[in-house]
């Protein structure tokens, strides 16, 4: 979205409104003849969204509170920018935080703020669009647009008494394809994730599909800490709650960015990247052979130019023959490499990576190494793929007759403009 469609002209609205009541300071006037809550909902919406905006004494009691809240949100945004500027002044250039456009999760009145309607914020359904939609060439090639890739979400505050915290809530992306939630974190209060001082990063979900950024997108978040006092959610603590609106015209592309969001318990750091010519890569991994003492521990995806990897799988559980536990979606620059790291553990077994006798290790275009522990060997294997506009790529890791893994990467654009 451009600046005109994503916001409103605050100065014009200020000039059109009669002066605020002198006795009320910055608060809305109390001399209201008929509360907005008593008006028909359609009438309130008509007043708040009229273009051009016409202010009269009869609708002042609706527009004045809206104006007051708009000013409050603007001041909060200015304070945030100042805080980030002060923080960056203490950091080397390479560690600077990128300031973002923070928005309230539930602005009042919602109809007064265009972005709330543009992103259909009142609709909390997940996106119905799925991945792999344009994997074959059609009558013409669809254009390649910018895509947003979230790399990590980490609590950067202090843990009271170094104790762990149970985090629940959501982080989701709304883009112009359908403006519905595309979750990257979604935990109920009954199934929170435990973060600790040693492990403050939230485990991210695979998005249902890639996130296309033609004119803009919105990152929605609401994270809380579950307390053990009672089952009353009102006694839980809020970490962060709000939205970030991204305009691709004002965001650097092709570099890893990090932004800080301040909350009452401490800040949350989000690492992400805008990929200028993004391709949706769906990674499907099938374990077709595994013996009991072999285990796939972690799979991490790396793309060209971004030092931080995306953890697409992390588990200590055994994998049985024929299971396919991994399917995830990431964004890759067209024509660039996607490298997958596979950490495979071997319990109570020490062996060399090189071929020895009848034991063969087949890792096309990969490197392998061993991390030795008391009773555990962790081998790291690499597979590398080059992104395409469509089609799929396949490669495999074969460790003799002990372990066989096949990785299929399906490439897709995000469709027509």
Image: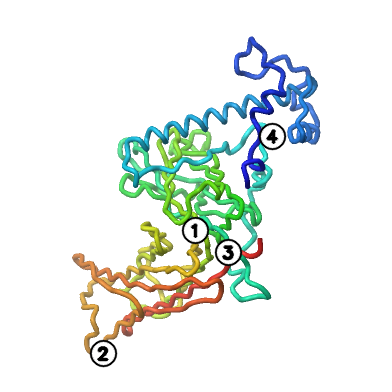
Residue placed under numbered mark 2 in the picture: 358
- Residue 416 vs 37, above or below: the answer is below
Pointers 2 and 3 in contact (C-beta within 8 Å):
no
In 3D space, how far apart are the residues under numbered discs 3 and 1 (Cα atoms)? 10 Å
Mark 2 and mark 1 residues within 8 Å of each other at the beta carbon? no
Q: Nearer the viewer, mark 4 or mark 2?
A: 4
Quarter where residue 45 is shown: top right
Q: Quadrant of residue 403?
A: bottom left
Quadrant occupied by the C terminus: bottom right
- Judging by the rendered image, the residue that carries numbered circle 1 is 275
Residue 256, image x, y percentages: 42, 53
Q: Nearer the viewer, residue 19 or 396?
A: 19
The answer to whether marks 3 and 1 mark residues whose Cβ atoms lie closer than 8 Å is no
Circle 1 sits in a helix, a strand or a loop, which is it? strand
Sort mark 3 into few (<14), some (14-19) or many (20+) by Cα contacts within 10 Å: many
Q: Which mark is residue 112?
A: 4
Query: From the viewer's perspective, is the residue at label 3 or at label 4 nearer?
Result: 3
User: Tag 4: Cα neighbours inside 10 Å, few (<14), some, or many (≥20)?
Assistant: many
Q: Secondary structure at mark 2?
A: loop
Q: Which residue is mark 3?
A: 144
Compare residues 299 and 394 and report the one nearer the observer: 394
């Amino acid at each position: 979205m451009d600046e005109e469609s994503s916001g409103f002209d605050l100065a014009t609205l200020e000039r059109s409104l009669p002066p605020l009541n002198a006795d009320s300071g910055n608060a809305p006037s109390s001399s209201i003849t008929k509360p907005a809550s008593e008006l028909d909902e359609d009438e309130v919406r008509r007043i708040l969204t009229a273009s051009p905006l016409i202010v009269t004494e009869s609708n002042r009691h609706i527009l004045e509170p809206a104006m007051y809240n708009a000013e409050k949100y603007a001041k909060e945004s200015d304070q945030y920018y100042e805080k980030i500027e002060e923080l960056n002044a203490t950091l080397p250039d390479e560690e600077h935080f990128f300031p973002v456009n923070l928005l309230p999760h539930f602005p009042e009145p919602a109809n007064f703020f265009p972005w709330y309607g543009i992103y259909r914020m009142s609709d909390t359904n997940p996106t119905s669009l799925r991945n792999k939609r344009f994997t074959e060439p059609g009558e013409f090639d669809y254009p390649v647009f910018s895509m947003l890739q979230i790399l990590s979400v980490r609590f950067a505050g202090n843990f009271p008494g170094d104790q762990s915290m149970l985090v629940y809530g959501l982080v989701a992306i709304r883009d112009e394809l359908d403006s519905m939630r595309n979750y990257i974190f979604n935990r109920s209060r009954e199934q929170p994730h435990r973060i600790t001082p040693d492990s403050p990063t939230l485990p991210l979900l695979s998005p249902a599909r890639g996130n296309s950024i033609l004119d803009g997108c919105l990152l929605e978040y609401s994270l809380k800490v579950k307390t053990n006092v009672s089952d009353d959610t009102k006694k839980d603590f809020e970490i962060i709650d709000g939205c970030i609106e991204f305009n691709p015209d004002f965001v650097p592309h092709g570099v890893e960015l990090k932004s800080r969001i301040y909350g009452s318990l401490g800040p949350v750091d989000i690492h992400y990247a805008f990929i200028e010519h993004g391709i949706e890569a769906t990674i499907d991994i099938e374990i077709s052979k595994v013996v009991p003492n072999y285990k796939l521990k972690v799979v991490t995806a790396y793309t060209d130019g971004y030092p931080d990897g995306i953890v697409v799988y992390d588990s200590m559980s055994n994998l049985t023959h024929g299971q396919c536990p991994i399917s995830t979606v990431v964004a890759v620059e067209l024509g660039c490499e996607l490298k997958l790291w596979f950490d495979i553990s071997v319990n109570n077994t020490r062996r060399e990576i090189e071929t020895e006798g009848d034991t063969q290790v087949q890792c096309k275009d990969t490197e392998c190494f061993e991390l030795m522990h008391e009773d555990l060997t962790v081998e790291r294997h690499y597979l590398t793929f080059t992104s395409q506009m469509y089609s799929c790529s396949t490669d495999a890791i074969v460790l003799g007759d002990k372990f066989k893994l096949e990785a299929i990467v399906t490439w897709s654009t995000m469709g027509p403009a």
